[in-house]
Amino acid sequence: MNTLFKLQRFLLLIPLLLTLSCNSDDLNDLIPVDKPKREIDNVTYQKFPDVTKLYKAKGNKNAETVIIFEQGGPASELDVDCIEVEEGNPGLADHITDYYRVYAHQALTFDTKNTKQTIIDNKEALRLRELNIDILHNLIIHFKKLNKKIIVMGHSYGGFVIQQYLSKFNNNNADKFIIMSSRLEMPLKIATNFINLEPAIFKEDGKTIIPFDLIEDEQKEFFKDYVNMCPIESILAGYHTIERFTESIKIPTIENLLYVHALNDKQTGRLSNDELDFLKERKSQIIEIPDTAADGHSAPFYSPYSDKIVEFIKR
């Protein structure tokens, strides 16, 4: 399966993976919007004695720069081809072949027992959330001790994982963070629609929500089939993307963060003025992809936008 096909597959799943819960009765258990908490009984920071089990990697392990990649999803399988070179598709992958590319496990790919559940509540969602963050922190600290330059990069749901990391550990441990096609404040209407098993997506303006009954027939059938499957991936993402990161991230300055968003992103939508103001106030760098991009959600992987990302990495 080639890289482009994998990207298309993940991009198609992203809107559904963002905010779905299997049972609308679980709505009362969602993370409070105004108080994105993580106080959970018996859940503490996890250190892993064998860090090599937390990732798979490609490239030169002796390279000075390590790119830790958080994939979209959440998914139950670790994809190690997301940022690899594919012939005929020039872009980000072409520029990072000299770096050590580390594909970080997330909660569901790290421990298959986590995928055996069918319904999870707020407490279990937060436990899995913390596992995501702790895996990433262990990797950052491991490579930092090896005196590597560390770039943490995430796409779509991977961006949410990075934001959760920033809200817990701040931005001091890695050299740079890159978030692509994600949101600091996913519209709650999208969340409500998915929780009610009536998925919604954005129009090409990246702002207007298309309700379930107006989605094109072919895509609607896909959503129906997927909702009926009700996988753990959907429930977990539903809990995690409700968090208001403009409130939970307390870092006053995040100059080592690059945030890439597209005006016509149909999966996660464009950043709102409040989200943009949050980033600007913290002196983060922003790349805005115009609505002329063929696919705003995947556009960061390809030229000319990938060229700007590479400039940030090499700076």
Image (tube, rainbow, N blue to C red):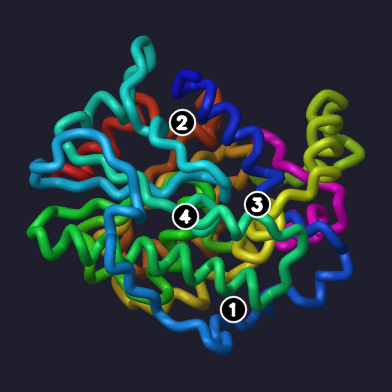
Q: Are the two marked residues, 4 and 3, in contact with CB atoms closer than 8 angstroms?
A: no
In front: mark 4 or mark 2? 4
- Residue 290: x percent and y percent? 48, 33
Identify the disc placed on residue 299: 2
Report which quarter residue 13 is drawn in.
top right
Identify the disc placed on residue 233: 3
- Residue 177: x percent and y percent? 30, 56
Q: Is residue 104 left or right of residue 17?
A: left
Q: Are the two marked residues, 2 and 3, in contact with CB atoms closer than 8 angstroms?
A: no
Question: Up-down: is 30 above or below 191?
Answer: below
Spatial CA span between label 4 and label 2: 28 Å
Look at the numbered disc 3 and give the secondary structure of its residue. Answer: helix
Spatial CA span between label 1 and label 3: 20 Å
Spatial CA span between label 2 and label 3: 24 Å
Residue bearing mark 4: 110
Pointer 3: residues within 10 angstroms few (<14), some, or many (20+)? many
Q: Amino acid at mark 1?
A: Pro
Comes first in the chain, label 4 or label 1: 1
Identify the disc placed on residue 213: none
Q: Amino acid at mark 3?
A: Glu
Residue bearing mark 1: 36
Q: Which range of residues does the magenta coloring cover?
A: 187-205
Pointer 4: residues within 10 angstroms few (<14), some, or many (20+)? some
Comes first in the chain, label 2 or label 3: 3
- Residue 2: x percent and y percent? 46, 19
In front: mark 4 or mark 3? 4
Look at the numbered disc 4 and give the secondary structure of its residue. Answer: helix
